[in-house]
C-alpha cells in the first residue's frame, strides 16, 4: 500500500493523517492538538529544506500581519508558488531581505511529496497572500510552477527559468488556449484535503463557500491554481468528512489532465453514495 504521508516520522501526526484519510473525525480539542503537532513538525521540516544556519537567521518569518482582526478566519485560499522547488519558496517567505519591495507570505507550503509546512501559524496570525482576503482567509501554497512558457522547444517558468527536464513529460498543454501547465501531485491533493479537514475541525468559522482559489479573489492579476487543480471536488470532499482511502487516484504520482478528470468522477461518485447525488 502506498504511504500517503512519507514526510513525517512523528507517530501521532502520522496516525492522525491516516485516520483522516480513512474518514475519522476529530473533535475541536483533538484538531487543535494536531495543528500544534504540525506546527512543531514544520520547524523540523523547514530546517531540513533550508538548513539550520538559514533557519536560525530568518525563521520564524517576520512577513505576516497581526492576530486575526475579525475573530477567527472564515475561509481558505489555494495558491501555487510559480516555483519549482520547496527550498526557494520557503526562503522567499522567510525574513531574508528581498531585492524588491514585495512582502508576500503564506500560512502553509505543501511540497510535491505532500510535506505540510506551516510558515505563519494559521490558528493565530494573518499572512499576506491574497490582498483583500488576507484579514479573513488562510493561505495554502502548493509547490508548482503553474502557467509555463514554451519557446524554441524549451519550457520555462518564472518567464525565463528553465523548467526541470525530468518533469517535462508530465507538462499539460491546453489544446484550446495553447497554454502549458505543470500538474499537481496526488500527494499534494491528499495533504490539502487532510490539512483543510484539520483546520475546519479546529476553526468552526471556516465555511465551504469561503474555500476558494487565488484567481477567485484576484481575477484581474492571478490565474492560480489553474485548470489542473480540481478545487470544487476537493473542497466538497473536505466538508463531507467522507473517507477517501483506496481511491484509484491515490495510486498515481503526478496527476495528468486525464487523471484529474478521473479523480473528479471518483470523488463525485464517493460523495454521491452518501448524499444521493453527485
Image (spheres, grey):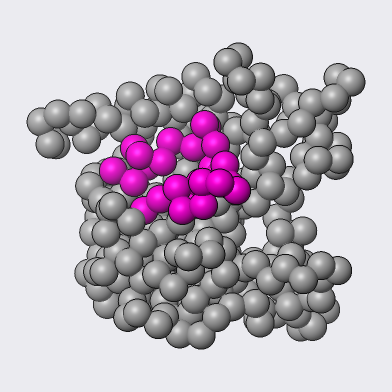
Quarter location, residue 64: bottom right
Residue lying at the far top in this picture: please name it.
175
Q: In the rendered image of this protein, does residue 225 appear above or below residue 258?
A: below
The residue under the point 39% across, 69% down is 136
Residue 262, x across and y down, in percent:
40, 22
Q: Is residue 230 left or right of residue 22?
A: right
What span is in magenta?
A: 211-236
The answer to which of 238 and 249 lies nearer the viewer is 238
Which image quarter is the C terminus in? top left
Residue 69, x across and y down, in percent:
40, 82
Residue 239, x across and y down, in percent:
26, 51
Residue lying at the far front in this picture: please name it.
220
Quarter location, residue 166: top right
Residue 95, x across and y down, in percent:
73, 78
The residue under the point 43% across, 23% down is 261
The answer to which of 55 and 89 lies nearer the viewer is 89
Q: In the rendered image of this protein, does residue 116 appear above or below residue 150?
A: below
Q: Is residue 231 left or right of residue 175?
A: left
Amino acid at each position: 500500500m502506498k504511504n500517503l504521508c512519507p514526510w513525517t516520522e512523528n507517530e501521532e501526526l502520522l496516525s492522525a493523517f491516516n485516520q483522516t484519510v480513512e474518514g475519522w473525525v476529530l473533535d475541536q480539542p483533538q484538531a487543535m492538538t494536531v495543528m500544534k503537532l504540525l506546527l512543531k513538525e514544520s520547524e523540523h521540516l523547514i530546517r531540513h529544506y533550508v538548513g539550520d544556519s538559514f533557519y536560525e537567521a530568518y525563521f520564524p518569518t517576520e512577513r505576516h500581519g497581526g492576530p486575526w482582526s475579525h475573530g477567527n478566519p472564515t475561509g481558505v485560499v489555494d495558491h501555487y508558488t510559480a516555483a519549482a522547488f520547496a527550498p526557494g519558496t520557503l526562503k522567499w517567505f522567510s525574513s531574508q531581505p528581498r531585492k524588491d519591495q514585495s512582502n508576500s507570505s503564506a500560512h502553509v507550503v505543501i511540497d510535491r511529496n505532500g510535506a505540510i509546512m506551516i510558515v505563519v501559524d494559521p490558528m493565530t496570525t494573518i499572512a499576506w497572500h491574497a490582498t483583500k482576503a488576507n484579514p479573513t482567509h488562510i493561505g495554502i501554497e502548493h509547490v508548482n510552477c503553474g502557467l509555463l512558457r514554451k519557446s524554441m522547444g524549451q519550457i520555462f517558468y518564472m518567464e525565463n527559468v528553465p523548467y526541470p527536464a525530468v518533469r517535462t513529460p508530465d507538462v499539460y498543454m491546453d489544446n484550446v488556449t495553447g497554454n502549458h501547465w505543470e500538474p499537481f501531485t496526488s500527494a499534494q491533493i491528499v495533504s490539502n484535503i487532510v490539512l483543510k479537514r484539520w483546520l475546519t475541525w479546529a476553526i468552526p468559522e471556516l465555511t465551504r463557500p469561503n474555500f476558494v482559489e487565488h484567481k477567485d479573489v484576484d481575477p484581474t492579476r492571478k490565474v492560480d491554481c489553474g485548470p489542473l487543480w480540481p478545487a470544487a471536488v476537493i473542497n466538497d470532499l473536505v466538508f463531507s468528512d467522507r473517507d477517501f482511502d483506496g481511491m484509484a487516484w491515490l495510486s498515481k504520482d503526478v496527476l495528468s489532465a486525464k487523471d484529474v478528470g478521473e479523480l473528479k468522477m471518483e470523488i463525485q461518485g464517493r460523495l454521491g453514495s452518501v448524499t444521493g447525488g453527485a
